[in-house]
Image: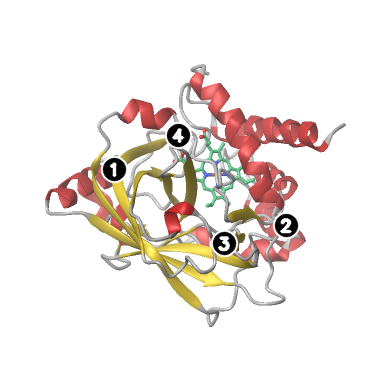
Amino acid sequence: MTSELAKSQISATIVDDIEHLKGTYAGYRRAHARGVCYDATFTPSGEAAALTTAPHLQSTPVPATVRFSHTDTNPHLRDADRAVRGFATKFHLPDGGTTDLIGVNLDRFVASTPEQFRELIQAAQPDPVTGKPDLQNVRAYAGAHPTAGPGLAAAAVIPTPVSYASATYWAIHAFFWRNAAGEACAVKYRWVPDAGNVNITPEEGAGWSATHLAEELAERLKAGPAGFTLVIQLGEEGDNTDDSTQVWPADRTEITAGHLSITGEAADQEHWADQVFDPTQLPEGIEVSADPVLAARSTIYAVSYDRRIHKR
Ligand code: HEM
């Protein structure tokens, strides 16, 4: 069996597992089902230009499309609930191509490999009697994979932001940048909100509508754009680049790659909702790391795309 075939088979199996765990919502993404798309402009600072030839990280602003989302497979869950949020950006490049950068408001993942993620889904299956996941099984998963523990613990207490524009979002995986001289460096990305990190208590969200965060952002954008700074952490010798449960030390050198200004809702929501945001869709000057979760996401998202586009 070729590794490509192996990858596509485990990807289909993982999507089956997610459907089995969470149910199927025809026509929706199998994760991050509910989202809204926005128009934006990314203005590079120029600081990244010495480290990468990527066209959107030089000196010319580029248009971008952003999709904010609720992580669940069920598109009808309430925004006030504790949940991971997504921030997917599609940069529109000068040559007509695109590149995607996908973040969540969590700094690390909950599995080191797609196979581990499958184990986690199995561990989270509801008990047939109580209808709820058996926490012993999730604890056993964390015990068997100690590096997954911090991500799981952080996800369990993740705060709800007052706005999509008031959370920090991490792209989690390491990538490699390559400059004009052919030199490579390891990088990690995060979006830091101009509005600061501002969260609610679950009680404060009691009066929210299910889709409060999209309504709040629509109101906020009437007063002006919502902004995020793209901060890059530069890896050093020995920093892990292939395990998305690992973060780098906080004292690593950081640069500001640019600023994103979100201006309003995209006119054609249906068109943008149909698109795939794929973290391995990269221009010259940016390369994937050997992180197996990153490698699998492309085929997993293609399987989800195929099902939702055929209204399954
Ligand atoms: C094995 C691990 C993972 C699995 C099985 C998985 C599964 C999925 C699936 C099925 C989708 C829907 C794709 C589509 O229909 O277009 C999705 C979207 C998404 N995933 Fe993942 N994912 C994984 C890892 C991650 C990681 C590490 C991140 C962190 C950045 C992430 C963030 C997102 C976001 C933000 C979206 C929504 C993108 C959009 O708005 O189109 N995922 N994921």
Specify which label sits upstream in the sequence, 1 or 2.
Answer: 1
Residue position for label 1:
39
Asked whether the beta carbons under mark 4 and mark 1 sit within 8 Å of each other, the answer is no
Q: Amino acid at mark 3?
A: Arg
Asked whether the beta carbons under mark 4 and mark 2 sit within 8 Å of each other, the answer is no
Q: Amino acid at mark 2?
A: Ala
As drawn, which residue projects farthest toward the front? 181
Q: How many C-alpha atoms fall within 10 Å of the one at disc 1: few (<14), some, or many (≥20)?
A: some
Specify which label sits upstream in the sequence, 3 or 2.
Answer: 3
In this view, 307 is above or below 239: above
Q: What residue lies at 25% left-to-right and 32% top-to-bottom?
A: 267
Q: CA distance from mark 1 to mark 3?
A: 27 Å
Q: CA distance from mark 4 to mark 1?
A: 25 Å
Of tags 1 and 2, the one toward the viewer is 1
Q: CA distance from mark 1 to mark 2?
A: 43 Å
Specify which label sits upstream in the sequence, 4 or 1.
Answer: 1
**Quarter residue 146 falls in:** bottom right
**Residue 162, visible in the rendered structure:** no
In this view, 145 is above or below 100: below
Q: Which label number is shown at residue 108?
A: 3
Specify which label sits upstream in the sequence, 4 or 2.
Answer: 4
Callout 1: SS: strand
